[in-house]
Image: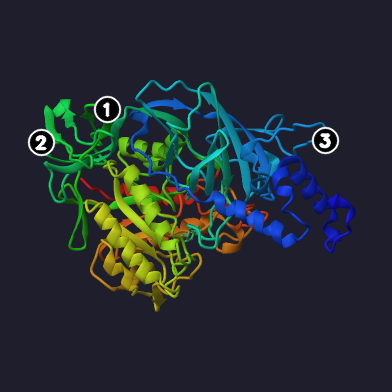
Amino acid sequence: MLLSKPIAIVTHSRSIITISNFIHSNFYPLKRFLQPSSFIKLFLFFGCLCHVNAIVAQSAMINVSSRHTTNLNGQWKAILDPTGIGTWRQIWKEAKPVKKTDFVEYSFEGGPLLHVPADFNTQLPELTYMEGTVWYKKTFNYTLPKGKRLFLHFGAINYVADVYLNGNLLGSHEGGFTPFQFEITTALREGENTIIVRANNQRLKDGLPGTGYDWFNYGGITRDVNLIETDHSFIEDYFIQLKKHSSTEVLGWVKLNGTKPSQQIQVNIPELKVNYKTTSNAEGKAEIKFSSKFKLWSPEKPVLYKVHIQCETDTVVDDIGFRNIEVKGNKIVLNGKPIFLKGVNIHEENPIRAAKAFSESDALVLLTWAKELGCNLVRLAHYPHNEYMVKLAEKMGLMVWDELPVYQHIEFATPGVADKMNLMLREMIRRDRNRCGVVIWSLSNETYSFTPNRDKALVELSKQCKQLDSTRLTTMVINNQGYTNNTFNVTDTLYRYVDVLSLNEYIGWYVPWQGKPQDAKWKFVCDKPVIISEFGGEALYGSNYGPKDEAAYWSEEYQEQIYKDQTTMFRTTPNLSGVCPWILFDYRSLGRMHPLYQNGWNRKGLLSDRGEKKKAWYIMKKYYDSISNE
Ligand code: GCU
């Protein structure tokens, strides 16, 4: 039929053939519309796409591990879709041939299996550098008791996710590092149910991050997947932390979701004999206000209490610590005492496995290294890491710096970008605001001051952050300070809108010293605590290819000298309240292309990708051991 007509786009004849056969076999009703004008076909193709992005995922309920869950981790069936044609094929419909002449050019049966949670790039050689679409399928049986509700919860999917249940779109989510969920109570079937996920990690110009970043773009269903059963009304969210500037008063709230919003609420801390009772209002919200003699959480004593939050139809239990973090003048103060933040940067990667980190055991490897270095803080760069990381850090007495992937070039003036920033901010704070270990919300990293609308958008974001949580410190990491005559001139006015002045400087690596480190001078746009949030240089562990005093040979000695100079400068840097070397361990970044020294790895680690200590490690450890916060 269509095939016989040698239409203009003969070069594409093969594809025309394919498309019309495809249409014939799968979308007969549509056929009569698809006269051979490619424009119509394109219009329909994009029609499908628009339909896909209509329904936005719900904000996820918090504290999943304390809920009635059915875990869906494990092997998922997959279809690799590098061209992205799967959306047009409507893979979620899982079409099957009906007549003898029918055929379907995709199927999950007989295809590859992918492990969830994990990135897909390290699971199949053909996915190594994949930045595109992979379709996942998982089936489950579930009998939902009468009056109960069921949710499908994802810890994170990088980057855009479309989620289908039994062939119908539940909705979509954009953002690779925060949780989201869908209520499936009414969509559930008796017997077998089928979840299909389209996970796409293509870089988006108006994405967060944008198209350029110095880490590996691991795609896929990268964190836990759970079914969560609740009663008709449940405890959706809560905030149980000390009031700002207080070491005894808790000021928070509980939020119910459901048909019975107004209920008796209790917050019990058996260890402290706290038994607080109140009632939620018609919106399901209840203020929580009580005092107690807390042993305050600190890196030396990471005390956590079992807190039971109850309403008539739900109970969740959380391990919560209580501490106070604030700025006094140009000092950071924890529980009333000035503290020096001994930090280290970490990417969400397990270098030993050369893959994305996602589990508690991954977190234990990375955080144990940080403790060994003498750290009391970890900067989780440049995006919210998985919950295991944040919870374990808190348990191990490591303060946490949470950050949004508002990284370098961001299209702040493009419609929708501000909403995306706001959504990610809300999702990050919602998940982690009961983690007393989290002391800093970092809103951006190295954004370009000349980008249109940058200042306005980030000032607005910092205000929203304070509205969502005023108990923690805020910062924006900037690296546009001047450095002339061994003098740093820190001028960015954005610093006026945050609590802590964080800056990245790579003197000794990207920029040569202009004088003795101990003589470096500083001018700051405002008198606030200063954190040097990145510094360092590269070295290939054991590199012995050339003169030690030349950068081009990636020697450990060259990196060691950078650390000697930096830690010397720190002793004379005014307002310095913390430092954070870039970075704890070598990590994958495809832009690092020197075949001998880098081979797709950023080699600024103090540890190699096998956890071997470079010479600079000992300089940093000695510096941290020399600083007491007692
Ligand atoms: C930047 C940036 C990091 C990057 C580092 C580097 O400062 O924030 O993400 O990896 O420099 O160049 O290694």
Coordinates of residue 579 in the picture (x, y in percent): 35, 56
User: Upstream in the sequence, badge 2 or badge 1?
Assistant: 2
Task: Tell me the quarter of the picture where residue 394 sits.
Answer: top left
Q: How much space separates mark 3 and mark 2, taking CA atoms?
A: 75 Å
Residue at (58% x, 36% y) in the render? 167
Q: Nearer the viewer, residue 9 or 405?
A: 9
Residue that mark 3 sits on: 101
Numbered disc 1: secondary structure: strand
Residue type at mark 2? Ser
Give left or right: position of 207 versus 23. Answer: left
- Report the residue marked by disc 2: 292
Query: Any mark on residue 314, and which?
Result: 1
- Label 3: how many Cα within 10 Å (few below 14, some 14–19, many 20+): few
- Badge 1: residue crowd in 10 Å (few <14, some 14–19, many ≥20): some
User: 147 or 85: which is nearer to us?
Assistant: 147
Is 388 above or below relative to 407? above
The kind of residue tagged 3 is: Thr
Instruction: Name the mark on residue 478.
Output: none
Nearer mark to the viewer, of 3 and 1:
3
Q: Position of residue 531 (x, y in %)?
A: 32, 60
The first of marks 3 and 1 along the sequence is 3
**Colour setting:** rainbow
The amino acid beneath tag 1 is Asp
Tag nearer the camera, 3 or 2: 3
